[in-house]
Image (tube, grey):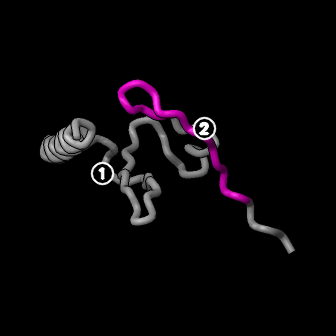
Amino acid sequence: MQTPATPPTALVRIRRAAQITLPRDIRDAAHIEDGDYLEAQVTPSGAILLRPVSIAGREPTPDQETEILAAVDEARASNAAKRRR
């Protein structure tokens, strides 16, 4: 009987401007390529879930880009407000 492969895990450091680098084995296992988008969510347990999302043609339409940038701006403003408390 063959045991299932253990999914790769990695320690990731938060860098300047809150950037992270996903190690190659994680990107390969999740089939993530340059230009892909990830949806980030905080779960009820406090874990951070990164989930690849499909955007047609890998390039957003102008409307999608506007929506994405607005969501990013809103999240940044919210995080900045929380840090000021």
Residue 25 visible in rendering: yes
Does the stretch in magenta take in 61?
A: no
Residue 68: image location, x then y, percent: 21, 45
Do residues under tags 2 and 1 come within 8 Å of each other at their CB atoms?
A: no
Q: Which residues are magenta?
A: 6-20
Residue 53: image location, x then y, percent: 37, 54
Q: How many marks?
A: 2
Q: Amino acid at mark 2?
A: Arg
Give the camera-side residue of 73 and 60: 73
Instruction: Name the disc covering residue 12, or none.
Output: none
Q: What is the quadrant of residue 6 in the picture? A: bottom right
Task: Name the residue at 37% across, 51% down.
Answer: 40
Which residue was labeled with disc 2?
24
- Farthest right residue? 1
Residue 68 visible in rendering: no
Task: Name the residue at 45% across, 28% down.
Answer: 15
Prevailing secondary structure class for the magenta stretch in the rendered image: loop
Q: Quadrant of the N terminus?
A: bottom right
Residue 13: image location, x then y, percent: 53, 34
